[in-house]
Image: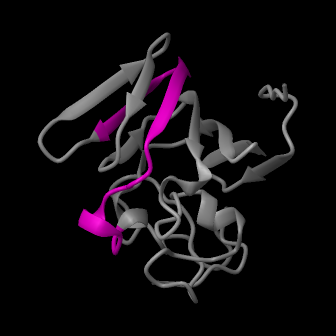
Amino acid sequence: MPSVSRDRVAEIDDYGVVEERHEDVNGTTIQFLTFREDVDSAPLLRGLPDDHCNCPHWGYVFKGKVSFDLADREEVYEAGDAFYLSHGHIPRAEPGTEYRRRAKEEASPQAPHDLRHLRRGRGHPCRPNKAFAIAPEGVGCQNAVHTAGSPGFAGRTEC
């Protein structure tokens, strides 16, 4: 049976404020995420059904804290917590957070997850011809806050 670990994965993508280590195993994406700054994924999910992630996820928090807006409530998970999220959530993470999550590729083929479309070069899910960068919480349009010459810009355009 295939396995992966944080230090033994197929791909490592560094988006500046977040590092994603991931591998697809038998139709399941396994990700190890490290957040360097506050991240609110709400702008990344605009244009998806209900402006929420529609992929179910299983996860485990190694360090820090991650929260999920579920429209009617907020779920908060800290180091040592394992969790399951059904569809319809918005992830947020604080600096220093490290967690693992997994999702079935076929869970929501019409709605690529917040980082999945980044690494495949598809750009913003509702603006497929525009690339973007994740930005710290509260900094204008988080799909385009990085400007030429700033860390993490790498030629990304504004939304």
Most foreground residue, 105 or 62: 105
Residue 9: horizontal and vertical position, in percent?
84, 37
> Residue placed at 57% from the left, 67% from the top?
133
Res 20 quadrant in image: top right
The scheme the figure's colours follow is one colour
Which residue reaches farthest bottom? 129
Q: State the count of labels.
A: 0
> Residue placed at 42% from the left, 23% from the top?
83
Res 54 quadrant in image: bottom left
Vertical placement of residue 141 versus 68, above or below: below
> Residue placed at 47% from the left, 84% from the top?
127
Residue 35: horizontal and vertical position, in percent?
57, 39
Residue 64: horizontal and vertical position, in percent?
48, 22
Most foreground residue, 145 or 97: 97
**Quadrant showing the N terminus:** top right
Most foreground residue, 157 or 50: 50
Vertical placement of residue 133 versus 113, above or below: below
Which residue reaches farthest left? 72
Vertical placement of residue 83 versus 119, above or below: above
The stretch in magenta equals: 46-68
Q: Is residue 53 magenta?
A: yes
For residue 36, side relative to residue 110 (left or right) = right
Q: Is residue 26 magenta?
A: no
**Quadrant showing the C terminus:** bottom left
Residue 27: horizontal and vertical position, in percent?
69, 48
